Image: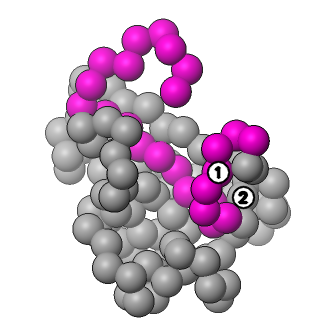
Amino acid sequence: MEECTFCKIVKGEIPSSKVYEDDQILAFNDINPAAPIHVLVIPKKHIKSLIELTPDDELLIGKIYTVINKIAEKLNFKDSGFRVIVNCGKDAGQEVEHLHFHVLAGAKFGDKIV
């Protein structure tokens, strides 16, 4: 496993406010939220970004979206709506080089691109 910040969170070396966890996926509250609800969903396997996905990762990525739906149900925002954002690369705003999905909810986002 790489030694990035999110890998350290997966290993328990850095504490997090967990929302969901199973053997492949971890979801936790963002420490610098951009919305009233801001959850990061990550694969426990270190994948640097979307660009590094392989055909072997297809089931994992599908599972991540199923987990996002479970989180929406658990945190009661599935009916009001939410946004899922994946930044890929520095120019897109990816700050941690470990694939992660931002799940934002609890506010009306409008037409602006976040």
Amino acid under label 2?
Answer: Ser
Location of residue 13 with respect to 108 vertically, above or below: below
Q: What element carries label 1?
A: loop
Asked whether disc 2 touches disc 1, contact meaning CB atoms under 8 Å apart, the reply is yes
In the image, which residues are magenta?
Answer: 91-114
Residue 1 lies in what quarter of the image?
bottom right
Q: CA separation, marks 2 and 1?
A: 9 Å
Is residue 59 shown to the viewer in this render? no
Image point (61%, 56%), residue name:
95
* Count of all numbered marks drawn on residues in the image: 2
Q: Position of residue 35 (x, y in %)?
A: 32, 36
Mark toward the start of the polypeptide (2 vs 1): 2
Q: Does the magenta stretch include residue 102?
A: yes
Q: Is mark 2 on a helix, strand or loop?
A: loop
Location of residue 10 with respect to 92 vertically, above or below: below
Q: Indicate which disc residue 72 carries.
A: none
Image point (40%, 49%), residue name:
68
Q: Residues within 10 Å of mark 2 (few under 14, many from 20)?
A: some
Location of residue 89 with respect to 3 vertically, above or below: above
Is residue 7 shown to the viewer in this render? yes
Image point (41%, 89%), residue name:
13
Q: Indicate which disc residue 94 carries.
A: 1
- The residue singled out by tag 2 in the image is 49
Q: Position of residue 14 (x, y in %)?
A: 39, 82
Q: Main secondary structure of the magenta part?
A: loop
